[in-house]
Image: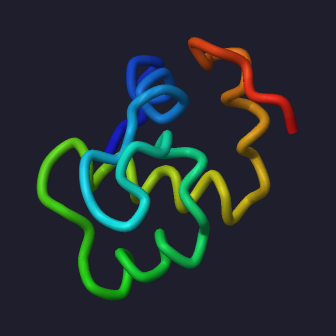
Amino acid sequence: MNLEKKHLVALANMKMPFGKYGGRVLIDLPEPYLLWFQSKGFPEGELGMLLAWALEIKANGQESLLDPLRQYPVIH
C-alpha cells in the first residue's frame, strides 16, 4: 500500500461519508474510532486505505504534518 501525495491531501481534507463521525475530516477522526475499524475491518477501497493510514499517522503522533495540506487551516 503506497502512500502518495494525493492520499495525504485526501486525509487532510476528505470527510468521513457515514457513521457517528460523518462529516468530520478523516485525519480528525478520534483514534478509538479508527481502532474500532481496525478490529472490525476497514471498509473496502480507497476509504479503507485512508482510514488505515489515518490510524498509522495518529498512532505515531504525526497529524500536524498534514496541516499544510488542509484546504482550510484548523486552529489547535
Which residue ends up furthest to the left in the rendered image? 44
Residue 19 placement (x, y as % from top left): 29, 64
- How many numbered tags mark residues here? 0
Q: Residue at x 26, y 68 (%)?
A: 42
Give the left or right position of residue 4, taking residue 72 as reference. left
Comparing 22 with 65, the one in front is 22
Give the left or right position of residue 17, taking residue 15 as reference. left
Comparing 30 with 21, the one in front is 21
Give the left or right position of residue 10, taking residue 30 as reference. left
Comparing 24 with 51, the one in front is 24
Color theme of the render? rainbow
Q: Residue at x 21, y 42 (%)?
A: 46
Q: Residue at x 66, y 57 (%)?
A: 58
Which residue ends up furthest to the bottom in the rendered image? 39
Residue 29 placement (x, y as % from top left): 54, 56
Comparing 2 with 39, the one in front is 39
The quarter of the picture where residue 69 lies is top right
Residue 56 placement (x, y as % from top left): 57, 59
Q: Quadrant of the C terminus?
A: top right
Give the left or right position of residue 23, taking residue 60 as reference. left
Residue 18 placement (x, y as % from top left): 25, 55
The quarter of the picture where residue 12 lies is top right
- In the rendered image, the vertical position of residue 45 relative to residue 42, given as above or below: above
Q: Residue at x 48, y 26 (%)?
A: 13
